[in-house]
Image (tube, helix red, strand yellow):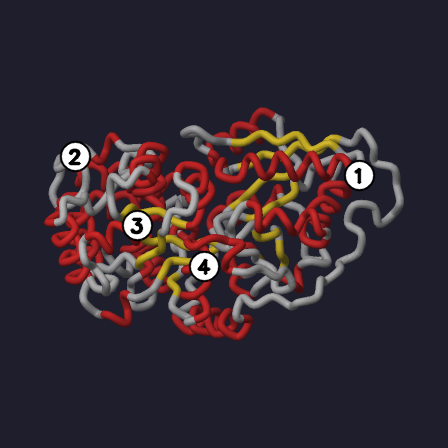
């Protein structure tokens, strides 16, 4: 069953609930029970297989499971999908081959629809009531919750504050015109404005394309209308504004952006070769290694000059921990997830990965999570956030992959705007009919 469009008032209510929560954390520690050994059963020698999608947290996750083994005797074998690995394809291969992980990740909405029959119902777990309201809808189906949110993330244009100062830029750009003026001033000061990582299909198909959908007047309703054939991408004015933003980044970016992958993009930015790059809070750990203490922040990604509408960051949950319904170690897997959010060592993981915790009871400071996540937190506190939409697309990652190829063709000037819109519509027609 597909998730139906929820309407703009659902978004408003979610944002109000989020604002009411304030993403604040209680000073005390909430205890969910001893997740590691509530039944006092000796689990020494138990092995849990965990398939990790997020290479940025692989080191911290490896350290986490080692600590868990010390405390409980339970070994967790982590396999990380990184270095260009397609997590969705890899997960399907594992399921088809019978090598199913006990714990893995799904993104919610369309991804939940795809895997729901294989997932353990976690509604009765003690951490569910502690989840921030924003994190629940994507992983809820027919009233049941099937996953535990990993972290809260946000993205936009990461910018180098020192390079902005060198160019004499004191007012941060919010509108598209202001962003162009900023790029012109940076270029005049001998500074490359953008470092574009357009070789990465997730950068293009997931995040860049998301701008075109999340800035619709009612993004959830619009995605549903396109899926049902009530709206056409070829006739949408927001998409036309969106291509203006793409053109701006290419005009003021490095040569051959389609040859720049994630590592090269972040490395070049960390070395001060450009003032802005499209990325999010997940780069903080890499930045800390490449250029410790670099003064950076996050800017919105505007497509027009409507200041209030453009001054927002895209915020959401990248993925959810889930447990295979057929796992022989479901009990132990649930104990691990409970330990993660209830123990001191488990909670430390959120600070280690420099992300915003998705639970109300986990305290944190903006200094702990780093400047990028701190900017996201500020936008959350001000109720200036936009939803992630690609998790709702028909076809999910297969759709975003194909759209990325089409946008890359546009960036590479192999097709024009009108052909791009027609190609994007064709992709939606294909996946909406499945």
Say whether disc 3 or disc 4 marks the residue closer to the N-terminus: 3
Real-space Cα separation, disc 3 to disc 2, in angstroms: 20 Å
Between tags 3 and 2, which lies in front?
3
Label 2 crowding class (10 Å Cα cut-off): few <14, some 14-19, many 20+?
few
Residue 192 drawn at (x, y percent):
18, 43
Real-space Cα separation, disc 1 to disc 3, in angstroms: 44 Å
Between tags 2 and 4, which lies in front?
4
Residue 413 drawn at (x, y percent):
12, 37
Tell me the number on the disc at residue 5.
none
Say whether disc 1 or disc 3 marks the residue closer to the N-terminus: 1
Question: Which residue corresponds to mark 3?
Answer: 160
Secondary structure beneath label 3: strand
Question: Which residue corresponds to mark 4?
Answer: 374
Label 3 crowding class (10 Å Cα cut-off): few <14, some 14-19, many 20+?
many
Secondary structure beneath label 4: helix
User: Which quarter of the image is occupied by the C terminus?
Assistant: top left
Say whether disc 1 or disc 2 marks the residue closer to the N-terminus: 1
Question: Which residue corresponds to mark 2?
Answer: 255
Real-space Cα separation, disc 2 to disc 4, in angstroms: 32 Å
Q: Are marks 2 and 4 in contact (CB under 8 Å)?
A: no
Q: Nearer the viewer, residue 246 or 394?
A: 246
Secondary structure beneath label 1: helix
Real-space Cα separation, disc 1 to disc 4, in angstroms: 34 Å
Residue 166 drawn at (x, y percent):
21, 52
Label 1 crowding class (10 Å Cα cut-off): few <14, some 14-19, many 20+?
some
Say whether disc 2 or disc 4 marks the residue closer to the N-terminus: 2
Q: Do the residues labelled 1 and 4 touch (CB within 8 Å)?
A: no
Q: Which residue sits at x=23%, y=65%?
A: 171
Between tags 3 and 4, which lies in front?
3
Quarter of image, res 374: bottom left
């Amino acid at each position: 069953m597909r998730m139906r469009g929820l309407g703009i008032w659902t978004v408003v209510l979610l944002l109000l609930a989020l604002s009411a929560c304030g993403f604040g954390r209680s000073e005390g520690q909430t205890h969910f029970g001893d997740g590691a050994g509530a039944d006092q059963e000796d689990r020494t020698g138990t092995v849990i297989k965990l398939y990790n999608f997020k290479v940025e947290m692989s080191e911290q996750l490896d350290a986490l499971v080692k600590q868990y083994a010390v405390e409980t005797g339970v070994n967790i074998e982590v396999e990380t999908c990184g270095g260009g690995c397609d997590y969705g394809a890899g997960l399907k291969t594992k399921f088809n081959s019978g090598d199913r992980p006990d714990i893995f990740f799904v993104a919610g909405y369309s991804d939940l629809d795809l895997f729901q029959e294989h997932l353990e119902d976690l509604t009765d777990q003690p951490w569910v009531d502690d989840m921030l309201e924003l994190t629940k809808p994507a992983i809820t189906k027919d009233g049941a919750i099937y996953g535990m949110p990993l972290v809260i993330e946000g993205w936009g244009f990461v910018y180098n504050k020192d390079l902005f100062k060198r160019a004499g830029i004191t007012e941060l750009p919010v509108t598209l015109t202001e962003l162009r003026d900023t790029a012109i001033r940076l270029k005049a000061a001998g500074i490359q404005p953008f470092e574009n990582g357009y070789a990465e299909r997730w950068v293009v198909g997931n995040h860049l394309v998301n701008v075109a959908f999340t800035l619709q007047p009612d993004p959830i309703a619009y995605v549903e209308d396109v899926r049902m054939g009530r709206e056409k991408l070829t006739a949408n004015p927001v998409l036309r504004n969106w291509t203006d933003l793409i053109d701006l980044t290419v005009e003021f970016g490095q040569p051959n952006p389609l040859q720049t992958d994630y590592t090269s993009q972040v490395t070049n930015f960390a070395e001060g070769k450009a003032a802005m790059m499209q990325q999010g809070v997940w780069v903080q750990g890499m930045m800390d290694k490449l250029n410790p203490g670099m003064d950076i922040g996050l800017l919105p990604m505007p497509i027009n000059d409507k200041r209030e509408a453009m001054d927002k960051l895209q915020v959401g949950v990248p993925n959810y921990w889930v447990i295979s319904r057929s796992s022989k170690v479901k009990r132990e897997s649930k104990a691990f997830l409970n330990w993660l959010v209830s123990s001191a060592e488990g909670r430390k993981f959120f600070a280690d990965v420099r992300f915003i915790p998705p639970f109300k009871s986990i305290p944190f400071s903006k200094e702990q999570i780093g400047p990028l996540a701190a900017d996201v937190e500020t936008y959350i506190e001000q109720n200036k956030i936009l939803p992630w939409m690609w998790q709702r697309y028909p076809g999910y990652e297969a759709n975003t992959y194909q759209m990325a190829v089409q946008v890359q063709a546009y960036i590479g000037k192999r097709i024009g705007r009108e052909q791009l819109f027609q190609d994007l519509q064709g992709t939606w027609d294909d996946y909406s009919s499945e």
